Image: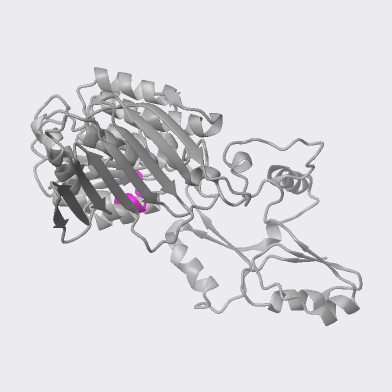
Amino acid sequence: AVVITAGTSSNEPIEFAGEVSRLKGRVVAVGAVGLDVPRDIYFKRELTLKISMSYGPGRYDPEYEARGQDYPFAYVRWTEARNIEAFLDLIASGSVDVKRLTTHRFAIDEGARAYQLITGATVEAYLGVLLEYDTERVTGGRVELAPASAPRADATGAGATAKTVRIGLIGAGGYARAMLLPRFKDAGARFQTIATASGVTARDVGRQFDFRFCASGADEVFADREVNLVVIATRHDTHAALAERALREGRHVFVEKPLALTDEELNGVLVAAAESEGRLMVGYNRRFSPLARRAREFFDDRSAPLSIVYRVNAGRIPRGHWTQDAREGGGRIIGEACHFIDLLQFLTGARVVRVYAEPVVSRQHEIVEEDSAMMTLRLSDGSNAVIAYLAEGDRLPAKERIEIFGAGSSFVIDDFRAAVAYRNGREEKIKLRAQDKGQAEETRIACAVVLEGAPAPIALDDLAATTRATFRLRDSLRAARALEV
């Protein structure tokens, strides 16, 4: 048998494997290599070609790899774990000797020499090269990136007036780097401690945005008593627990949406927020956009309900993406539709009380039905809204369009770039210089909450209503009936 573990787009490994194999031999391709199989070689030797997942059954299955849901032994003899167990048993018994594979060892302090060897700078034969660490050394939980450049805050408790907003960031994905951190910087916040699952990411992002410390765990952010605003931008399944912990420590919290994935998680956060001196803020930015505020002011003197059509050109997300996972991402209704529900509540000044949702059904396995849905919402003031959350359209049309009707008037928002107000047979066009979904105003207000002790910009009851509405919409999709929130 010939096992190919190379990584190259070249077809050379598959050709060479055929050339060196005996008659009726086996070629097993584990690595990512070119697979243009040369018929002449494989035909004449009657070779068998097998494509193998890198570690065996269980590979790329989040239920197995991340959550430990093992495959039944009677049905799957060799899984990732059982493969490595068998291999370790062979080493322990002496049947497999791997010692000869290691030709060089370097202390970590001499790591540069190891790289000189494998890059060819040192002309010397090698096979396995190991870097050795001091296993007795106790390492700190955080690394200082920059010394203090200004006097430190004299009070960090949520009940005290702060002179400076000092942010502790947990999670540093694309949205945090592109939107949140630049806006908080513009709002005058200082960056104190950053923690990510990868310490390397924390260091790189921390240096980019002048954080004082970086760490590989959230504990270090909570341990830093100079942090007076905890910003949570992790994956969705950790939002509720981290927000609740921060609130129970009396910290102000800004958590990216969604606030929670289940009613139980939400209840825990709400209880903590009600008992905490800290303020709970959630990243529902649309209500802070200038066009949304113009729309609310436009209907301020109404005495009749509103009717709203909210069209979202969402685009597809692959089934395997983490946001589609019910336990990690919660799906797109919980993960993103919460934005639109919060805006509906802001525009009407009312809360969602009843929902009904129906998916756009597809026979294609790779398409997640909940990616496209028509959602109808009833609000407490009698207003009605339809959210058309659609994933099957072309990416060119604008993502969001909101049409608001009521009291003989209309207001249309186009992707938070422009709007048109209609009243008494006249129209007023409003155009912004650039798209503004409210992130800058949102972060400015969050900083004001910390500095001035102001109340949170969105009431707890409104946060709860928005989040529960997403839960009931998801339930409605599956139950095929309207549900009370």
Residue 139, given in percent of the width and then of the height, sits at: 39, 42
Magenta stretch contains residue 95? no
The furthest residue to the front: 425
Q: State the image quarter where residue 432 is shown.
A: bottom left
Q: State the image quarter where residue 99 is shown.
A: bottom right
Count of picture labels: 0
| Stretch of the chain drawn in magenta | 170-176
Residue 358, given in percent of the width and then of the height, sits at: 50, 38
- Residue found 66% across the figure and 64% down from its top: 31
The furthest residue to the bottom: 40
Compared to 480, does 102 lie above or below?
below
Q: Quadrant of the C terminus?
A: top left
Q: Is residue 29 left or right of residue 482?
A: right
Compared to 72, does 427 lie above or below?
below
Residue 437 visible in the snapshot = no
Foreground pick, 427 / 135: 427
Magenta stretch contains residue 174? yes
- Residue found 21% across the figure and 28% down from its top: 279
Compared to 250, does 320 lie above or below?
below
- Residue found 21% across the figure and 45% down from its top: 410
Foreground pick, 162 / 413: 413
Residue 332, given in percent of the width and then of the height, sits at: 45, 43
Q: How is the image coloured?
A: one colour
- Residue found 38% across the figure and 42% down from its top: 387
Residue 220, given in percent of the width and then of the height, sits at: 32, 37
Q: Quadrant of the N terminus?
A: bottom right
Residue 449 visible in the snapshot = yes
